[in-house]
Amino acid sequence: MKTAMIIVALLGFSSVVAAQDGTAKTQQVEQYAYDSHLDVAKVISEDPVPDVCAVVTTHMTYQDSQGKRHVLAYNVMGRCSQG
């Protein structure tokens, strides 16, 4: 009986995680501009900067002071550490 309850609990947790992943993938991406006014209360994740000698687009997922999640696209210079 305990094993069945543990399995049910794990399946419920897995579906919550899967639902969160699906939400993040369908969220609208905002494009950063120099006049953007950002309300970043907490950075959730950032894409790694690639090892290229060029300007590339990267993304940051953050939470604002109201608790709303945002995905921001912005340009950065690659790491340019090629030997």
Image (tube, helix red, strand yellow):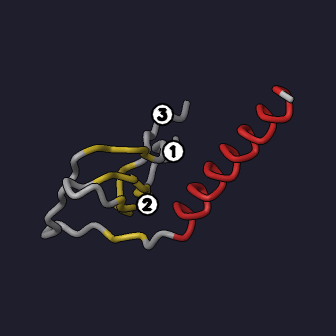
Neighbour class for label 3 at 10 Å: few (<14), some, many (≥20)?
Answer: few
Report the residue marked by disc 2. Answer: 57
Residue 3: percent from left, percent from top: 85, 28
Tell me the residue at 33%/71% (across/down): 31
Q: CA distance from mark 1 to mark 3?
A: 10 Å
Seen at 60% across and 55% down, the residue is: 21
> N-terminal of the two: label 2 or label 3?
2
Are discs 2 and 1 less than 8 Å apart at CB?
Answer: no
Q: Secondary structure at mark 2?
A: strand
Q: Nearer the viewer, mark 2 or mark 3?
A: 2
Quadrant location of residue 64?
bottom left
Looking at the image, which residue is at 86% across and 29% down?
A: 1
Quadrant of residue 10 within the rendered picture: top right
Q: Residue furthest front?
A: 1
| Amino acid, disc 3 | Ser
Q: Which residue is mark 3?
A: 81
Badge 1 marks a residue whose secondary structure is: loop
Q: Where is 82 relative to 43, above or below? A: above
C-alpha span from label 2 to label 1: 10 Å
Check the picture and name the quadrant holding the C terminus.
top right
Q: Do callouts 2 and 3 mark residues in contact (Cβ within 8 Å)?
A: no
Question: Which type of secondary structure does the marked residue at label 3 adopt?
Answer: loop
Residue extending furthest top? 2
Q: Which numbered disc flags the more N-terminal residue, 2 or 1?
A: 1
